Image (spheres, rainbow, N blue to C red):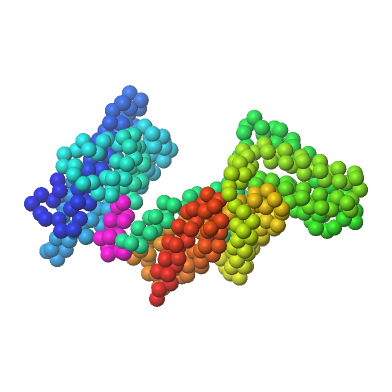
Amino acid sequence: MLGRGMQMPNFDKERLEIEHVLAALSDSLVSAAGPLETRGSSRRARILGKRLMIDSLREAFDRPILVRGEYKDTVHIRMLSRNIIAQIDNIESDFGEDRALLGHVMKLTPLRSYEGYPPTPGPLLKELIAAGVELSVGRALKVLRFYLRELSARANGAPMEQLEQIRRLQEIVPKQQIAPAQFGIVNNRIVVVDRPPTTEEADRRNISAAHEHIQASGQELASTLDRSNCDKKLINSVKALHSQIVAGGNIIKIGLANMGCSIMAAQYQHELPDAVVAMLKAYTSDIAMYVAQFPEWEQFTDKAAAIRIDEDDVASVSRAVGEVIDTLSAHPELADPEVPRTIAFIRELLAEPGKSSKRAAFAMIRTIENLVSSIVQHSINFLRKTAEKAVDVGSSAASKIIVGLLSVALVGAVGIGPAAVNAGVPWIQQAAEIVQRQIETLARP
């Protein structure tokens, strides 16, 4: 089927690999449709319909593309890649409500079982084989799509080193982690994303009751402190904590704010009557028990306790975060004002002594990690399109926005890099190097 009687000048090996995978996908769909015969003919028909689409793509290898009477391998491979990606999207969309079918039920037929299997597999087959014999059809489709995008870009003359950097960046940058803040990009601006904490169903009634009690006691405590002569810093700390409780915000942020409030209360207790001191201790103790009911807080504190960072790391994190805040404040077009305010609030906790500062430093690393992750994940598609020459870098307004966002990510990644490595987050430094190169590429005239 591989262009019989015709020499494939540039992409013969890649074409062979693609055909191997398409053959395996076709047989996998047939295998999956068989047992479904008694479970519903409509579902089986859909699967077999997708199989026919894949077979039609395999037949495309016998139809070379002629441009002005000359065979054009690059045109052929780009058209094949585009058509196959469209069918992958079609299959995933059609089975969108039945993710288990692609992700677990349908397994890819072993690739080595096909005639003509190459003695030296290329990158596509290597990656699929490395995934093991239980590779799902859904995972195989994702790997094939990514490979085809790179192959099409190469056929279009895209710089492979840049594409490899982008692929590496996508691989190493994780999703956002449990932290005092998470971020998103809305209308090309960074925003703080409020996500309700996860709870165990058995704990929800107790959590709700504790939340109501803490709200009431916090309001009473704030009113009592307003009538006292205590330092305004303590009053503001209690009110800030109370407002977070009322809003039902990020549980890590609440837990850290409560720690800060406890330390401040101990510093100013000599200014307060014994009854108010008792109210403060009861309030912070209740909040400590409240946040302890959330699995996210337990995960966060366990990881914070395990990291190895010293006072120098805490100081370097504080300086780096200061630079991030300054950068965001100086460029309001890149971020909502709540973003630098939130980061500044978390940074204040770094001044706490002992274990609290270590926990706060980990919180700050995780927060900047999430900031970098949100920016990179948002920028990946644009970076790939520029590498594939699908957009005009120099004249694109979007390019300037992406450069600005990536510059924020770079400031954060470079600043916390060494401390992040000590905290078990080595990808930050690796990402910083790639982001720097991507900024330089985008900034070229």
- At 21% across and 35% down in the image, what residue appears? 113
Quick one: 255 or 402, which is closer to the camera? Answer: 255
- At 33% across and 27% down in the image, what residue appears? 36
Task: Please indicate, yes or no, whether residue 300 appears anywhere in the rendered image.
Answer: no
Instruction: Give the left or right position of residue 332, taking residue 134 as reference.
Output: right
| Residue at the bottom extreme, as displayed | 445
Task: Please indicate, yes or no, whether residue 400 appears anywhere in the rendered image.
Answer: yes
Number of marks drawn: 0
Q: Position of residue 396 (x, y in %)?
A: 43, 70
Q: Is residue 318 highlighted in magenta?
A: no
Instruction: Give the left or right position of residue 178, taking residue 38 as reference.
Output: right
Instruction: Give the left or right position of residue 194, taking residue 79 as reference.
Output: right
Q: Position of residue 180 (x, y in %)?
A: 63, 50
Quick one: 186 or 197, which is closer to the camera? Answer: 197
| Residue at the top extreme, as displayed | 38
- At 27% across and 63% down in the image, what residue appears? 156
Instruction: Give the left or right position of residue 403, taking residue 341 as reference.
Output: left
**Secondary structure mostly seen in the magenta stretch:** helix
Q: Is residue 150 highlighted in magenta?
A: yes
- At 33% across and 23% down in the image, what residue appears? 38
Magenta range: 147-159
Q: Position of residue 78 (x, y in %)?
A: 25, 57
Image quarter of residue 151: bottom left
